[in-house]
Image: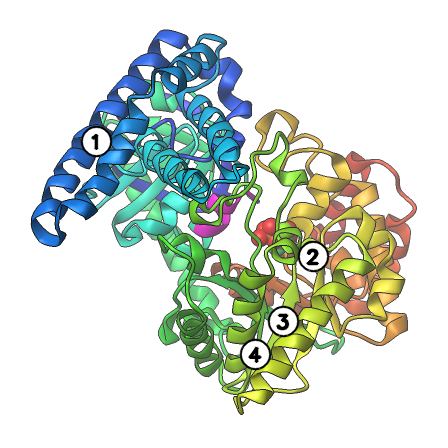
C-alpha cells in the first residue's frame, strides 16, 4: 500500500519498521494533538501504567540506597513514593484526563501547580518539596513519553512515529536507521533538519502509516516521490534498490565539485557554508566540501545530555569544532531551545504557544547563568580557531544590547582569570522574525554580521507553524512578503557594510537560489549533503542576470506567480 507524504530529507530508505511511541515527549506541544488523540480511558490506563512502573523503580532504588548509603538516603526516595500516593493530587490528574487532556499534559499541569504552591511557602522544608515534585513530574513524563523506553535498534531500521522529535533522534544510534516516517513535521522541522544532516531519507505527513504497520514489517521510504510503501513485494524492493543505486551514483558525480571555487559564471564569489549540530568528524566535514560552518546549532549538545553541559564540556565541543575547521569560519549559535526543542532539565515554563514564548535568546536573557556558561565556553574556543557568536530569534534592538552586555561581562571574567580568547570575536544575529527584518537597518548597526533564518522567518511572517502540514500551503519561501523582507535585510546589510548570510533551508532550494543571489546574498549555509549540488548550480548562474531578475520578482505579489517565474528562469540556464 502507498501512502503520500512530504519529502523532508531526500533519498530512498528500505528497512524494517520500528514504531516509536505516539507520545514521545514535549508536553508543551500536546495541545496540537489533544483533540485528535486523547481518549480518557486510554489516557487513564497510560497514566496508571506509568505510575506503577515509576513506583516499582522508586521502591527498588530506595532499597538499593538503604544498602549502599544508608536508610536516610533511601528515605528521600520513599518520600517521593508518599507524594505519588497523594489522593488529592491523583484525583486532580484524573479530573483533567476526564476533560480530554492527555495523561502527559495532566501530569504536567497538576504537578506544576503543586510545585508552585510549595515554592511559594515561607518554610524552607516545604519549599524543598517543590524540587521533589518536579523530579516526579519529569520521571513520570519520561515514562509516558516513551523516552524512557529502551528501543532495541537493529541495522536497517525505519522509524515510524506520529511525531518523532529531534530529542529522540539525537539520542539513538542513527547509523542503523535507513529511513524515517513521521506524521508531524515538514522540511524545516528540526527532526527533518537532523535527518538531513545524518543523511537519512525522511517523509512526514503520512499520518496513516503508523496505524497501518507493525514492528518488523518491511517498508520503503520513498523520499524522492514523497511516499511510503508498506509491505512491498520483492519486485518493488528490487526496483527501489536499483533507484537507490542510481541516486548514489549521481551523488558520486557531484564529487567533481568538492574542491572547486564557488563562483558564478560571470565571476561573483559565493561562500558555501554548512549547517552542523552535535559531533562532527573531520572526514565528514572535509567530504561535504563546505567553505566554513555557517551555523552550528548548539541545542544538540544540550539535548544529548541529562543535565546542563558544564562550561568545560561545552568548551571541549566548541574547541573541537574550531580546530577541525582550522582557517575556516565557524559560526556558533547560542542556545535556541524552546519551541519544539524542549529540554526537560532546563524547566521551560508551560506555555500555550511555545514557538511564541520563552524560546532562544528570550530564555537566555532570562536564565543568564545558562547563557553566560555557554558564552564563556564559546569565547574560550575562539582562541583555537575562527569563531563567531550568533544570537537566535532576535526581535528587537534591546535583546542585542542586553546580549552584548552579558558577552562583555563574560569577556571581563575571562580576562581577570587570564584565560585567552579572541577579543575581536564577531557577534552576529539571526534575522528570523518579521520584526527584526523590518528593523534590519538599525540592527545592522549593532552587529558584525546577519544570518537570515528563513525556516522561522517564513513561519512567523506567514503565521504558519513550520511543522503543521495543514498550513503548509502558506509556508513557502516564494511568498512575496518573505521575499521582500529578505530583500530589505540584504539592503540593510549592504548599506551598513556587514556580511549577510542565509542559513534556513530555503538556501538549499535550487529554484529560489538565483533570486537569493540576485538579491545580494553571497553566503549560503545549508546541510552538508546539499553543498555539492548547490555549488554546481551556483557555478552555472550569471550574477548580473540574477540581479535583474530579482528586481522583477520584487514587483510580483503572488506566490504562485513568483514560483512560476523562477521555475521558468532556471529552465533558461
Ligand atoms: C531558521 O529558522 O531558519 C534557522 C536556521 O534556525 P532553526 O531552523 O534552527 O530554527
Ligand atoms: Mg530558527
Sequence-first disc among 2 and 4: 4
Disc 2 to disc 1, C-alpha distance: 40 Å
Label 3 element class: strand
Image x and y of residue 306, in percent: 35, 52
Q: Is residue 211 above or below residue 383?
A: above
Image x and y of residue 480, in percent: 83, 42
Residue holding disc 1: 234
Give the class, few, some or many, for how many residues have Cα within 10 Å of label 1's Cα (few <14, many ≥20): few
The reply to whether residue 263 is visible in this rendering is: no
Sequence-first disc among 2 and 1: 1
Foreground mark, 2 or 1? Answer: 2
Disc 4 to disc 3, C-alpha distance: 9 Å
Numbered mark located on residue 513 in the image: 2
The reply to whether residue 47 is visible in this rendering is: yes
Sequence-first disc among 4 and 3: 4
Foreground mark, 4 or 3? Answer: 4
Residue holding disc 3: 389
Numbered mark located on residue 379 in the image: 4
Q: Is residue 561 left or right of residue 508?
A: right
Nearer-the-camera pick, 322 or 341: 341
Amino acid at each position: 500500500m502507498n501512502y503520500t507524504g512530504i519529502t523532508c530529507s531526500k533519498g530512498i530508505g528500505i528497512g524494517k519498521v520500528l514504531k516509536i511511541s505516539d507520545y514521545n515527549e514535549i508536553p508543551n506541544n500536546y495541545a496540537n494533538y489533544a483533540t485528535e488523540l486523547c481518549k480518557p480511558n486510554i489516557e487513564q490506563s497510560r497514566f496508571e501504567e506509568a505510575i506503577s512502573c515509576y513506583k516499582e523503580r522508586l521502591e527498588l532504588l530506595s532499597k538499593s540506597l538503604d544498602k549502599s548509603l544508608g536508610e536516610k538516603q533511601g528515605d528521600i526516595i520513599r518520600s517521593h513514593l508518599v507524594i505519588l500516593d497523594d489522593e488529592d493530587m491523583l484525583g486532580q490528574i484524573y479530573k483533567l484526563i476526564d476533560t480530554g487532556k492527555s495523561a502527559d499534559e495532566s501530569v504536567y499541569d497538576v504537578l506544576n501547580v503543586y510545585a508552585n504552591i510549595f515554592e511559594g511557602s515561607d518554610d524552607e522544608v516545604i519549599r524543598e518539596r517543590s524540587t521533589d515534585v518536579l523530579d516526579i513530574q519529569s520521571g513520570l513524563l519520561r515514562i509516558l513519553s516513551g523516552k524512557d523506553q529502551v528501543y532495541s535498534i537493529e541495522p536497517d531500521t525505519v522509524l515510524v512515529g506520529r511525531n518523532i522529535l529531534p530529542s529522540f533522534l539525537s539520542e539513538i544510534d542513527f547509523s542503523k536507521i535507513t529511513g524515517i516516517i513521521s506524521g508531524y513535521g515538514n522540511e524545516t522541522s528540526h527532526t527533518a533538519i537532523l535527518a538531513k544532516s545524518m543523511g537519512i531519507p525522511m517523509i512526514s505527513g503520512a499520518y496513516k502509516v503508523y496505524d497501518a504497520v507493525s514492528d518488523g514489517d518491511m517498508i520503503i521510504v520513498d523520499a524522492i516521490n514523497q511516499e511510503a510503501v508498506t509491505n512491498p513485494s520483492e519486485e518493488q524492493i528490487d526496483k527501489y534498490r536499483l533507484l537507490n543505486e542510481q541516486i548514489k551514483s549521481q551523488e558520486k558525480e557531484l564529487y567533481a565539485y568538492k574542491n572547486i571555487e564557488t563562483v558564478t559564471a560571470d565571476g561573483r564569489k559565493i561562500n558555501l557554508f554548512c549547517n552542523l549540530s552535535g559531533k562532527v568528524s573531520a572526514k565528514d566535514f572535509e567530504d561535504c566540501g563546505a567553505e566554513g560552518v555557517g551555523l552550528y546549532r548548539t541545542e544538540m549538545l544540550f539535548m544529548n545530555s541529562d543535565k546542563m553541559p558544564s562550561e568545560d564540556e561545552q568548551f571541549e565541543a566548541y574547541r573541537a569544532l574550531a580546530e577541525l575547521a582550522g582557517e575556516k569560519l565557524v559560526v556558533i549559535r547560542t542556545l535556541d531551545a524552546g519551541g519544539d526543542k524542549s529540554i526537560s532539565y532546563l524547566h521551560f515554563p508551560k506555555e500555550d504557544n511555545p514557538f511564541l514564548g520563552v524560546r532562544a535568546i528570550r530564555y537566555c536573557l532570562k536564565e543568564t547563568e545558562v547563557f553566560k556558561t555557554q558564552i564563556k565556553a564559546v569565547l574560550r574556543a575562539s582562541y583555537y580557531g575562527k569563531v563567531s557568536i550568533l544570537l537566535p530569534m532576535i526581535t528587537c534592538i534591546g535583546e542585542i544590547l542586553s546580549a552584548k552586555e552579558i558577552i562583555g561581562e563574560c569577556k571581563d571574567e575571562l580576562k581577570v582569570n587570564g584565560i585567552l580568547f579572541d577579543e575581536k570575536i564577531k557577534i552576529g544575529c539571526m534575522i528570523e522574525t518579521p520584526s527584526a527584518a523590518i528593523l534590519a537597518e538599525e540592527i545592522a548597526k549593532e552587529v558584525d554580521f546577519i544570518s537570515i533564518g528563513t525556516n522561522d522567518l517564513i513561519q512567523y511572517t506567514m503565521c504558519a507553524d513550520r511543522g503543521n502540514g495543514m498550513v503548509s500551503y502558506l509556508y513557502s519561501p516564494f511568498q512575496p512578503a518573505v521575499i521582500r523582507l529578505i530583500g530589505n535585510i540584504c539592503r540593510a546589510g549592504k548599506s551598513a557594510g556587514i556580511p549577510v548570510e542565509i542559513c534556513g533551508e530555503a538556501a538549499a532550494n535550487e529554484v529560489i537560489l538565483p533570486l537569493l543571489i540576485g538579491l545580494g546574498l553571497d553566503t549560503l549555509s545549508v546541510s552538508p549533503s546539499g553543498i555539492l549540488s548547490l555549488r554546481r548550480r551556483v557555478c552555472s548562474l550569471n550574477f548580473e542576470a540574477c540581479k535583474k531578475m530579482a528586481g522583477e520578482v520584487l514587483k510580483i505579489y503572488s506566490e504562485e506567480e513568483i514560483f512560476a517565474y523562477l521555475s521558468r528562469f532556471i529552465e533558461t540556464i
